[in-house]
Image (spheres, helix red, strand yellow):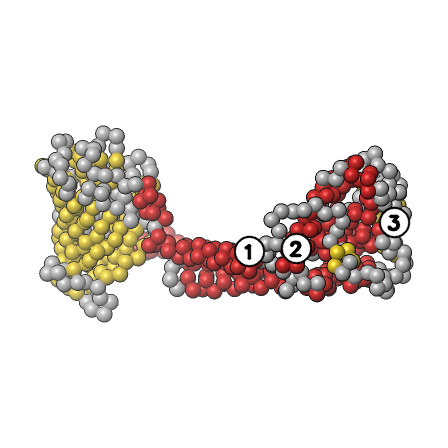
Amino acid sequence: MHHASYIVIFILTILTFTAYAQDFTINKFHADISINEDSSFAVKEIIDVEFHKLKHGIYREIPFKYIDERGNIIKTPLEVLSVTDESGNEWKYKTKKTGNVINIRIGDPKKYVEGHQKYVITYKVVNAILFFDDHDELYWNVTGNYWWAPIKEASANITLTVKKKSENLWAACYTGTLGSKESQCSFETSINNGEFFTKKNLNSREGFTIAFGWDKGLISPPSSWERFLWTIDIKENWVFLLPFFSLVFMISLWNARGRDPKVKEAVTVMYEPPKYNNVPLTPGEVGTLVDEKLDPRDITSTIVGLAVKGYIKIEESKTEGLILDSTDYYLAKVKEPDENLSPFERILMNSIFPKELRIPGKMVSEMKNDFYKYLDLLKSTLYGELINKKYFLVSPEKIRRVYLTAGIALTVFSIIAFAWLTSPVKSIIAGVLMGVPALAFARVMPAKTRAGASVYMDILGFQEFMHRAEKDKLERIGDKDLFSKFLPYAIALDVVDSWAKAFEGIYQEPPEWYVSHGEFRTFSPY
């Protein structure tokens, strides 16, 4: 039963192809090819068709991408100039690229044709000339191998439209299916000219390929720039130019709105953190002003800052393991947050030690499960403080969110819009690329005010002091709590190692806020 089904399907397939092939016959296929000095050439095809039944027209399929004799992938941009009948009257036609082929659909979908018809197709081709060491050559499939119809006669005439005469000419021709080396054809060469003819009928899916060579120096090879333009094919891939304009727009927008005002030419070393109304900025504020976002490092530095101020005590807890020891930290509340703390510091303490906490402390490892619930509140509070101090006009988080949303919206809109204009794959790639600049620039679009930019420069100066602190300078300061006092800022500014190394050999009071079972180490819960 199954074998019978396969036989029926096979027979139907053969009958379908046979019927399709017999819809028309190509009585004659002739091509005139004129090769120009710039290595481009014009092709005029005259296709004499005899229709055996009513049809709208024909399809002419021309490869524009193929593998040459040396195994290289060659892309030959092709421009259709006209499609007419033998009297010059225009045929309706549409072109479409499908895979490696340009498909020219010739005919009016509302009208039928029958009997003898002639189709004259004129087009221009570039990047198809092969430049060998001893000669240049055109290797061209005249008819193509895509016809589901026989071709009774095929011919081609090639002319070098150059001033000089080629002393030597080379020629060859091939017939048959794609890749065939059968040569049921002939050719004649004369002054800068070659004529080619088939000797037999070409069956369905058989073609006629010719090769014509001449002396070097008559044709100028394309420049590297021209080859580059042909490779990217702007006319076909114009949609990929639009993301470039999106990038240029975002660069201009960042330059206008995302850059901090320039307030100082150079960084001046500062020996203490910046102040607002004679009150030092908190470590969290300092860290946030540097990169315009609240991150775990800023929260850690603020916790250590609260410990230095006497609100928290940090106790190191070490657990021995079979291979490696694990370290955790116990945070104990020493006193309640008061008005001496900033709003951000008070909310941070209440987040660590909520009212429902029965014991006056918790392990840092325990915070990983529920501390995330307070992050949005902490961010809005800290950004609000910086806005109140006129360091930002708008919350950096809000600015980033606006551009991230715009980038996603632009991506979705572009994909939908491009889908009407190009292929689905290109529309998706180009649409994503349209949104990438906005998504990438979202991180750097928050901008400080002049006051914020000025404080930022002071912070860099303070960071420079802690990063390059010298032993004799620290000894002259004579503060036995200096290391602990500025340690939270060193954490926020990522210069802990440099700050600690500067105090080697300098006596500092052991911190009361930190309990360690070994030597004193920097608290780093993240």
Residue 269 percent location from the top left of the image: 70, 45
**Mark 1 or mark 3, earlier in chain:** 1
Mark drawn on residue 454:
2
Measure the C-alpha gap from mark 1 to mark 3.
Answer: 41 Å
The residue at the point 9 percent across, 37 percent down is 190
Mark drawn on residue 513:
3
Which residue type does callout 2 highlight? Ser
Measure the C-alpha gap from mark 1 to mark 2.
Answer: 23 Å
The residue at the point 46 percent across, 55 percent down is 248
Q: Which residue is mark 1?
A: 441
**Mark 2 or mark 3, earlier in chain:** 2
Residue 481 percent location from the top left of the image: 85, 45
Q: Residues within 10 Å of mark 3 (few under 14, many from 20)?
A: some
Q: Residues within 10 Å of mark 2 (few under 14, many from 20)?
A: some
Q: Quadrant of residue 277?
A: bottom right
Quarter of the figure with the N terminus: bottom left
Q: Nearer the viewer, residue 317 or 479?
A: 479
Q: Residue furthest bottom?
A: 110
Please identify, in this view, whether the residue under mark 2 or under mark 3 is nearer the observer.
Answer: 2
Q: Quadrant of residue 180?
A: top left
Residue 341 percent location from the top left of the image: 82, 60
Which residue type does callout 3 highlight? Trp
**Seen in the image, is 112 located left or right of residue 246?**
left
The residue at the point 40 percent across, 57 percent down is 239
**Mark 1 or mark 2, earlier in chain:** 1
Q: Are marks 2 and 3 in contact (CB under 8 Å)?
A: no
* SS of the residue under disc 2: helix
Q: Nearer the viewer, residue 160 or 461?
A: 461
The residue at the point 25 percent across, 53 percent down is 79
**Seen in the image, is 338 located left or right of residue 199?**
right
Which residue type does callout 1 highlight? Phe
